[in-house]
């Protein structure tokens, strides 16, 4: 007999236990991949890209399944997910602007030079 979602109890929807176990196993596998990045001593942008991708995937599964966001109304999902996404966009813009300011100052004032004092 196929496992269907259990009937609602007092207005609450019950989800099959198997989905939680599958997500737990998937989180374990993603964590193993994250540790493998260190084990194989990957470096540079590949290292940080993989670590961030695995981190975001794990966070997404936790939010979707364990925080029950996959079964919520779209308005609630937007209310919870949209503000952090906006913050990430603003952080990216500030980072880009900070680099632009730093590079503009380097171009205008040149590299830092050491001032040597004359001692007689």
Image (spheres, rainbow, N blue to C red):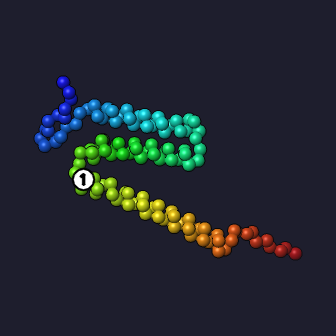
Tell me the quarter of the picture where residue 23 sits: top left
Quadrant of the frame with the N terminus: top left
Residue 42 is situated, as x and y percent measured from the top left of the image, at: 58, 41
- Residue at 65% over, 74% down: 108
Looking at the image, residue 31 sits to the left or right of residue 2; the answer is right
Depth check, front residue: 10 or 84: 84
Task: Name the element at disc 1.
Answer: helix
Placement of 114 over or under 20, stated as above or below? below
Report which residue position mark 1 lands on.
Answer: 74
Tell me the quarter of the picture where residue 107 sits: bottom right
Depth check, front residue: 2 or 88: 2
Residue 53 is situated, as x and y percent measured from the top left of the image, at: 45, 45
- Residue at 27% over, 45% down: 70
Residue 41 is situated, as x and y percent measured from the top left of the image, at: 59, 39
Looking at the image, residue 12 sits to the left or right of residue 102; the answer is left
Task: Check disc 1: other Cα within 10 Å, few if <14, some if 14-19, many if 20+.
Answer: few
- Residue at 27% over, 47% down: 69
């Amino acid at each position: 007999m196929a496992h269907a979602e259990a009937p609602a109890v007092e207005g609450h929807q019950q989800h099959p236990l198997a989905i939680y176990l599958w997500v737990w196993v998937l989180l374990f596998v993603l964590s193993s991949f994250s540790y493998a990045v260190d084990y194989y001593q990957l470096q540079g942008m590949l290292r940080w890209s993989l670590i961030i991708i695995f981190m975001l995937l794990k966070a997404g599964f936790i939010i979707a399944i364990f925080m029950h966001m996959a079964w919520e109304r779209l308005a609630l999902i937007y209310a919870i997910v949209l503000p952090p996404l906006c913050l990430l966009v603003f952080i990216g813009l500030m980072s880009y602007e900070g680099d632009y300011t730093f590079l503009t100052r380097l171009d205008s004032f040149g590299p830092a030079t050491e001032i040597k004092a004359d001692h007689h």
